[in-house]
Each structure stands twice: as C-alpha cells, then as structure tokens.
Amino acid sequence: MQLFKLAFDALMCNDVSEKISLTQKLKKHQIKSHDLKSKLSVKKISMPGRPLKPKLVNFQTLPKRDRSDLGMIKNIHAICHIEFNAINLALDAVYRFQDMPLQYYLDWLKVANEEATHFSLLSNYLKELGYQYGDFDAHNGLWQMTVDTDYDVLSRMALVPRVLEARGLDVTPSIRAKFNDSNYHKMVEILDIIYRDEIGHVKIGNYWYQYLCSERKLDPILTFDSLIKKHIGSNLRGPFNAEARLLSNFSQAEINYLEHPEITKLS
C-alpha cells in the first residue's frame, strides 16, 4: 500500500463523502513497515481539499452566535466545520512527515478516522434540523496553524494537538452545558463522544511531542514556550481544563506553566 499517496489523495479530495470514505479505507488497511518505503515529494498545501461551501471569511467578521434557535444551529455548524478541518489536520500529519516510526502513522490514521466520525455525526444532525454543512460562513484558522507548522513535525505536535485540540478540551464542558439547557439535547450525546475521543487525540499529540523532544534532547516546557512565542506571540489564555489535560498526559509541570507562565521557572 502506498500510504503517503493515499493520505495525500484523501487530504486533497474536495468531495466530503469521498474524503470520509478514503479516510475510512486508510484506517482499515493493515499498515506494515514496508508501506513506509514509498516516499512522496512533500508539497506546501495552502488549502486542502474542501467543498465550495462554507465560504471562508476572516474570523473577526463572523457574527457572535446567540442562544436563539438559529444561533444554536450555527454553533452546531461551527463545531462541524472544526471536525472537518480536523480530518485534514490528521491526514496532513500522515502525509507530510514521512520519517516517523510506524506507530505514528497508525495513531494519526486513528485520529483521522475518529474525526471523520465526529463530522458525520454533526453533519447528519444538521440535516435532521433542515440544514447542511456549508450553509453558514466559517473561518480557516485551524488550517492556517497547519500551514505555519509544516516545516517540522515537532512544531506540529506541539501546536496542533497540544494547543488547538487541547483548547477543545477546555471549552467543551461549557458548550455541553449550553446545549443541555436548550432544545438540542442530541448535541450533548455527540459532544460526549467528541470529548472522549479528543482526550485520546491530545494524548497522541503529547506522546509524539515528548518522543521528539527526547530524541532531540530538548526540554519540553522550554521548547513549548519558545514555539508559543514564535507562532502565537502571547501566552495561551485560560481557563484550562486541568483534569482533561492531565488525562491526555500533560504533566503537572506543564499545567503549572499554562496557568502561571509569568512565574513558572523554565528549566
């Protein structure tokens, strides 16, 4: 099996149903070490495969979503868009970094498959409500971080799972509470599935980040702090879900750094 070509084909597929099908087929393959020998020339991808809609706009131009029925449906659509992007994030992690151990690819194909499941759950729920993915504008911030970290697998592991996906762990409980207090109780069940799986995804990112820091003899907290300053420019803003982050294998020292970066001694 040409793993990297198949991952690239799924990544660049514009048709949503076909992208999900290709992602699921990749996960079902029994990948072996010899599948990693067929390398591809890696390209910079400013935009992965995606449908014509939703229209992508600047994040700051998106109107604030209220608790009206339409506002709640827009919230569902926004989460659906995040999960669609997450499929591409995981596929790019497979395609782009072609010199990692076999388990790395098994892990990120698992992530891609679970993100495809999340997207399908949300997309189908939108259809039940009389809408579909693409009906509302969205932003491209998640993919932009993927582009910004395409030069190095350590930077990718530091900033996509450990910042973007981990942020989902921080905010999901409050989002869940909002839907629990609405007419859209099915979202509570879907969010519980996403939350459970995302703990696993962040744990995978943490494992490979720590692996790479160890391999390169780098201090994990110092390196993370440096990458945050380089790519984000300011400290990450809380509140942080320490319980979920610990379950996803953030160390207590890393939690302390996140909560008190100005007083945490980096050593």
Image (spheres, rainbow, N blue to C red):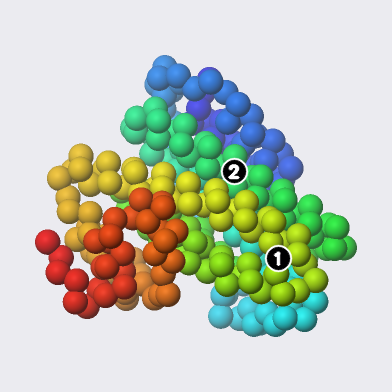
**In the image: residue 231, left or right of residue 106:** left
Relative image position of residue 248 (x, y in whole percent): 41, 51
Determine if residue 102 is in view.
Answer: yes
Query: Which quadrant of the view contains residue 83?
Result: bottom right
Amino acid, disc 1:
Ile
Q: Against 110, is 29 above or below?
A: above
Amino acid, disc 2:
Glu
Label placed on residue 76:
1
Q: Against 38, is 8 above or below?
A: below
Sequence order check: which comes first, mark 2 or mark 1?
A: 1
Q: How many marks?
A: 2
Decide which of 97, 257 is in the foreground and name it. Answer: 257
Decide which of 68, 147 is in the foreground and name it. Answer: 68
Relative image position of residue 251 (x, y in whole percent): 29, 55
Cα distance in 3D space between marks 2 and 1? 18 Å
Which element carries disc 1, helix, strand or loop?
Answer: helix
